[in-house]
Image (tube, grey):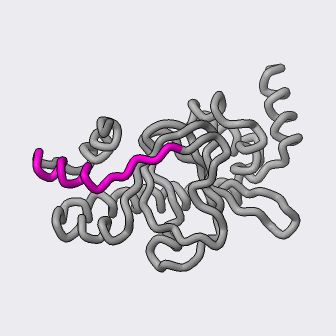
Amino acid sequence: MFDLILKNVARHITLTPEETDYFTSLLKPRKLRRRQYLLQPGDIMRHECFVNSGCLRCYLVDDKGQEHVVHFAIEEWWTGDMYSFLTGQPSAYYIDALEDSEVFLIDKPQFEQLFIDIPKFDRFFRRLLQNAYVAMQHRISQNLTLPARERYLNFIQQYPQFEQRIPLRQIASYLGIAPESLSRIRKQMMRR
């Protein structure tokens, strides 16, 4: 049941059997049906969330009703609204399941206690945040400087598994491209 999350943790830190038992005792499994929300605007993100199976997306909706995908999360990825989680302020984001999914949640008080009881988790989550920050900066740079075709090519190269699992309109939203433009780009690429 906990194989994937323990594999994820083991990439950065080594846990003793006792630490493993303690950590897994804090995890609460939750199943999400396709289109079910984990978070909606106005809610407070009260958990860190690890995707054990399935696919989630985090997005905003603007005043015109247009969705803007901030990120996707598939198996072995962490997701959530870090601002809301850390500050206790209401979220501006939706997080929903694009597929039937199973996640593990750890609530904020237990999350904070984990750092005290097993200090190496501080290093683990710091590395996750550093990696997420670098990825976010890279994405912003690409969205500001690259044409749509290059953004799409970089996306499918970096995340080849996404194209088969995520609807193209969602990928277009993530890349800041109109769905019609992404269809045109894909057709041009197929002709070549």
Drawn side of residue 39 relative to residue 186, left or right: left
> Is 90 drawn above or below residue 54 in the view shown?
below
Q: Nearer the viewer, residue 186 or 23?
A: 23
Q: Main secondary structure of the magenta part?
A: helix
> Is 72 drawn above or below residue 111 in the view shown?
above
x, y percent for residue 160: 58, 31
> Is residue 189 one of those drawn in magenta?
no
Q: Nearer the viewer, residue 118 or 41?
A: 41
Q: Residue at x 67, y 36 (%)?
A: 166
How many numbered callouts? Answer: 0
Q: Nearer the viewer, residue 115 or 136?
A: 115
Q: Residue at x 19, y 70 (%)?
A: 116
The magenta-colored residue range is 17-31
Drawn side of residue 182 relative to residue 136, left or right: right
Drawn side of residue 175 relative to residue 8, left or right: right
- Could you tell me if residue 13 is visible in this image? yes
x, y percent for residue 161: 57, 31
Give the image quarter of residue 6: top left
Q: Residue at x 71, y 43 (%)?
A: 171
* Screen quadrant of the N terminus: top left
x, y percent for residue 24: 26, 49
* Screen quadrant of the C terminus: top right
Q: Residue at x 48, y 62 (%)?
A: 133
